[in-house]
Image: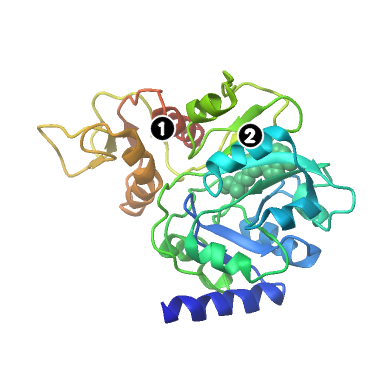
Amino acid sequence: MNKDLSNIKKSRHLLDKGECIAIPTETVYGLAANAYSDKATSKIFKLKKRLKKNPLIVHYVSLKMLKNDCKLNENFFYLFKKFSPGPITFILKLKKNSKISKNVTNNKKTLAVRFPKHILTKKLLQKLNYPIAAPSANISTRISPVTKEDVIEEFGKKIKFVLDGGSSKIGLESTIISLVNKPQILRLGGLEVSKINKALKTKLKFNRKNKKITVPGQGKVHYSPGIPIRLNIKKPKINEAFMLIKKRKLSDKNYYYLSKRKNLKEAAKKLYKTLRMIKKKKFKSIAVEKIPSVGFGEVINDRLIRASKF
Ligand code: AMP
Ligand code: MG
């Protein structure tokens, strides 16, 4: 516990100085910087090699601070009460007098906000007098990190500090919902859309082909392990890694199980970890067994389709 406290202190010190550090969240690790500072947030883009036009998610711990930056509406309060802190990101209208850096929004009049659940990150946020911008702590288009080691694998010595919070519990990015006008799902993620629909009494669906949406989590190539991925495969080729969601009687050493018994939540959690592991084993390609497109299966397929556009 003492170690955690001294690490939080160190994180705070670096963030106050305008540095960029990695923080644990229940979804994936984030690359964090002071969201009110142009200088600090520009470091995120540089480290990630992220295009300036891709806006960042800003992380809060208190509604009081959020109220300085965004206009809140009824749908927001409803979903916030039910699901925050947790794996849901809200797109809200930005207030005119907000101090959020223009780098964060790419000059848009909207802001993506989230309340993360990880205890260390919550404690850190409580000590800051600004919110933190934090996209996933990986080089753009690559696999998101779910442990401290993954972050170091991405950035090496270029990252000043990683606040170690163990493995991310969910292991997938947040679900993004726009509440600017009519609610609209912009990205599938750690909170099932069915739960949002139940709460709002709606029938929202994620529309992959929505051309108006230009967010990186929806870019064609994303979450890529850097080798080809083939989907809906019954039998892998020789020397190909095979990713499965249900244990088979006959197994080979190139078989990687996301779950023993087709538990899709468990499979989602293991997805990035497994892709990273396969990549390290130097396979030339990955075959993936058919995964049912329901609940977390839909999220897994969403990520795999983008990862396969290598
Ligand atoms: P990540 O880099 O994985 O943290 O992803 C952040 C996601 O939030 C990306 O898909 C962003 O484009 C999206 N995002 C951030 N700000 C906005 C915004 N104002 N409107 C729509 N999407 C946003
Ligand atoms: Mg990302």
| Left or right relative to 128: residue 301 | left
Q: Is residue 281 above or below residue 157?
A: above
Q: Ligand 1 appears in which quadrant?
A: top right
Label 1: few (<14), some or many (≥20) within 10 Å?
many
Q: Quadrant of residue 68?
A: bottom right
| Residue 181 percent location from the top left of the image | 76, 27
Name the image quarter holding the N terminus: bottom left
Q: Are marks 1 and 2 in contact (CB under 8 Å)?
A: no
Decide if residue 157 is on the left or right side of residue 60.
left
Which of marks 2 and 1 precedes in the sequence?
2
From the viewer's perspective, tell me whether residue 54 is left or right of residue 80: right
Residue 6 horizontal/vertical position (percent): 50, 81
Instruction: Measure how far apart labels 1 and 2 are at the Cα level.
Output: 17 Å
Q: Is mark 1 within 8 Å of ligand 1?
A: no
Direction left: furthest residue: 249
**What amino acid type should be assigned to the residue bearing mark 1?**
Phe
Q: Considering depth in this image, is 279 or 62 the residue closer to the camera?
A: 62
For residue 242, which quarter of the picture? top left
Q: Residue at x 57, y 79 (%)?
A: 9
User: In the displayed image of the protein, which residue is found farthest to the right?
Assistant: 96
Instruction: Give the amino acid type for the residue marked by disc 2 in the picture.
Output: Ile
Query: Which residue does the numbered mark 2 point to in the structure image?
Result: 177
Residue 150 position (above or below residue 14): above
Residue labelled with disc 1: 296
Instruction: Give the number of the disc on residue 152.
Output: none
What residue do we see at 72% from left, 68% from top? 129
Q: Can residue 206 be seen?
A: yes
Q: Which element type, helix, strand or loop, lies under badge 2?
A: strand
Q: Position of residue 57 (x, y in %)?
A: 66, 49
What is the quadrant of residue 88 in the picture? Answer: top right
